[in-house]
Image: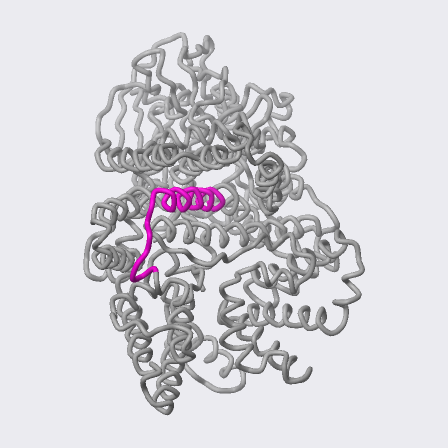
Amino acid sequence: MVFSSVEFLVFFLPALIVCYFCTPKKFTKCRNLILLLFSLGFYSYGGVKFLGLLFVSIAINYVAALWVNPERSIKVRKTAVALATVGNLALLFYFKYTGFFAEVLNGMGCNLPVPEIILPIGISFYTFQGLSYVVDVYREQAVVQKNPLWVALYIAFFPQLVAGPIVRYVTVAEEIEERHESVDEFYQGLVRFLFGFSKKMLLANSMGEVADAIFALHAGNMATSLAWVGAVAYTFQIYFDFSAYSDMAIGLGRMFGFHFEENFRYPYISRSITEFWRRWHISLSTWFRDYVYIPLGGNRKGSGRHIRNIIVVWFLTGMWHGASWNFILWGLWFCILLLGEKYFWGKWMEKLPSLCRHIYTMLLVIISWVLFRCETLLQVVDYISVLFAVKGTGLADQQTIYYLLQYRWEFIFAFFASLPLKEIPKRFLQKKPDCAVRKTLVFGGAPVLAMMLFMLSYIRLAAGSFNPFIYFRF
Amino acid sequence: MKRISKCAFIGCFLLFLLAAMLVTVFSPKSSYSYYENRSLARPAPLTVETVLSGEFMKSISDCMRDHSAWREKALRANTWANIHILKKPVVNQVVMGEDILLPYLPYAAMDEEKVAINALEMTNRIAKAKRITEENGGKYYYMMIPCQYAYFPQKYPEYLYNREDLTEATLRHLKPALADRNVDVVDMGEIYEAHGNPPEYSSTIDNHYSQTGAYVAYQAIVEKINATTEFGLKLPENITFHALENSYLGSRPRKLFNMYGNEEHLLWADFGEDIPFTRRDNGMGVPATVYTMPENTEEPVLYGFYMGGDIAETIIDTNRPHLPKVLIYGDSFTNALESLAYYSFDEMRSLDFRYYSEKTLEAYIQEYQPDIVIFMRDYESLLAFDGNGIYPDYEK
């Protein structure tokens, strides 16, 4: 099920709200059970057959966490954490990478059958989430959860189950046992949800229409200007699509008393690639930092080890996104840029005017999304060739004018929505914090805007066609 | 913000969801969306397999979307906003011209080699139909009619594709190939051009030609038949055309939920003399009329006004044995012409192989033994191999 669907909005969400809030507050366990049952229903809506896999993942992490508990011997704990890692990654590898590696080996002369395995939705997210729980318990950063249902709720909680953010157990451990739901929390969460919903319906989907149409063209039929329009459209699409999902997840969590970490902080205002990755998909980059990069030694053991660690992390980041050379190339692209900023041009760049650094960052980010969006390496080469006028029908064409005219409002709104404009009203209020008019404008403006955008989004939802979230396929 | 305001906000949202839920569940369900001209989604059969694979829930999702609360209002609002507020050049696949609504044609690279190969293939099919017709004592004609985008290519904004290159290449390859096989061709594009391409020959809000354009086509085919046979067909001498009062809901305004004002009205012909006939559609007797007259002057009429729309087989018998028998086959462009053409024939039969599957064209001709066979295609489908472009002996 997706948040931007009629069945979620009109049936699932109201039913959950009614069931949850009609249960007295003191029965937290009962409320948790309701959340768990609804979450399992949410997941099985896309196909019941993968529910078993989710249960296996939950079981592995629940049992492993019991065995890595500090009360056990260090040998048992190490064995358990190793088994949990192998178990989790084996599931992920089988469902996500078997076909890819079979193809790679066949390319090297083997003659293996290439199985067609359907990727269970959300497996990359809940595998990492479950693994982080076991490792955190092992590291004694989290207390083991002895109730399997609460481990199940942590892993399967519907807002973050299928497309993140990857929530650490420590973030929600206390809230699973005891949390404070209130009108204020519900209201804040709802407003956040509505803004996320609107971002998806009004901006991400429109930008997706442009990107899909242009990336479907053959490079030989495309002008440089059109290729840039397509790349920029996809740049907006992936940001609004994914950040909208995170907004909705965070908002929904908050409505039920959970507080998830932020996953995006206006990444397109970054002035370096290093900064970009501090602002983009924060839950994934911090996961890799804490569970791969730092355990490998981080930057503490010399340049050589540091470079190796960065390469490993970004190779894995690319692979996490998908079993394809494009994603590996995408990960390595960022690896090179980050190493470059660290060891070569980073210090020099700091002397440049802010605008130049911003242009540099966005140019490289847009190219990265071309690597991400293309389906084959050949398409990457062709598309990039058109971007830089090596191939294609010329510098500009009439199609570019069409897409810019047809989607002009969406491009304009997408541009402004990718900027931290919500800080402006805050500053406006800070100048005269006691002014009643300013307070009304600032605090009343957001919900009114959210509701208006929601109504427009509902129109688009009812009128539009199915458009799944990009990150569902990871 | 005060607590009461927050409660009110939450309440409004929940009330909206509740209302949407009730309307979605309890509103009367239709299986067809008139303005979208498509069937609405239905749930897949409930089986263990469809549940396990997710197919059942996917179909439920499609159903929910198609039957969601206030869907048609939402579609209308979305269309209205796109036309009037966002002022998009293309809305619901319709190009919003100043005085015309055209189809949006996605950019596609024209492949000259493919056009040439397809033109030869289509020529083979047409030549085969011609041979079958002649073997059964008839005469075969092929008519090409410009569809709306081909008639008004200059009406497209410069930044939109009008398929002019594809149309030109198709004609350039097809016509000589047909000439090589001695097929009698009537290209209405040439004839309309010789008349100066008057705008009234084509609809400005639909893919089809107007009744005026159809009448010119009727004259052209009769002249061609008379020039190549001894039949000496007659045209109505005192024909007059009358406009329906009802507004014409062409396929383009239909896609725009009839929110785009237009002044176009459909015409119907009065021959000035009575031509009694009987009519059978798909073997069943039906009222003897070639126009589906609306019940009142308020309801908008569709192109289906002519001949009642696309029908697999229609037989109009005027019981004038001294006149020849004609078989016309083709897509919906045949309809407006047929509403006139029965005047010149004893019996007029019409087949549409998009719907007709009882016999092959070859078998039909062998059984019917028509004096004249006319194959009509619009410029868009000149090289389309499905529907009426199938081989004459192809069995469905």
- Looking at the image, residue A21 sits to the left or right of residue B6; the answer is left
Q: Is residue A178 magenta?
A: yes
Which residue is at a point 25% across and 70% down the rendered structure image? A148
- Residue B179 in which image quadrant: top right
Which residue is at a point 57% across and 78% down the rendered structure image? A312
Q: Residue furthest bottom?
A: A75
- The secondary structure making up most of the magenta span is helix
Q: Is residue A137 magenta?
A: no
Residue A49: x %, y % from top left: 27, 66
- Looking at the image, residue B216 sits to the left or right of residue B37; the answer is right
Q: Nearer the viewer, residue A281 or A460?
A: A281
Q: Is residue A349 above or below residue B158?
A: below
Which residue is at a point 48% across and 23% down the rendered structure image? B214
**Is there any visible trace of residue B93 in the rendered image?**
yes
Task: Indicate how the structure is coloured in the image.
Answer: one colour
Looking at the rendered image, the quarter that the N terminus of chain B falls into is top left
**Is there any visible trace of residue B331 in the rendered image?**
no
Residue A384: x %, y % from top left: 68, 61
Q: Is residue A9 above or below residue A41?
A: above
Q: Is residue A36 above or below residue A196?
A: below
Q: Nearer the viewer, residue A113 or A318?
A: A318
Residue A84: x %, y % from top left: 36, 81
Q: Is residue A108 above or below residue A360?
A: below
Q: Residue furthest left?
A: B47
- Magenta stretch in the rendered image: A175-200
Q: Nearer the viewer, residue B112 or B53?
A: B53
Which residue is at a point 49% across and 76% down the rendered structure image? A291
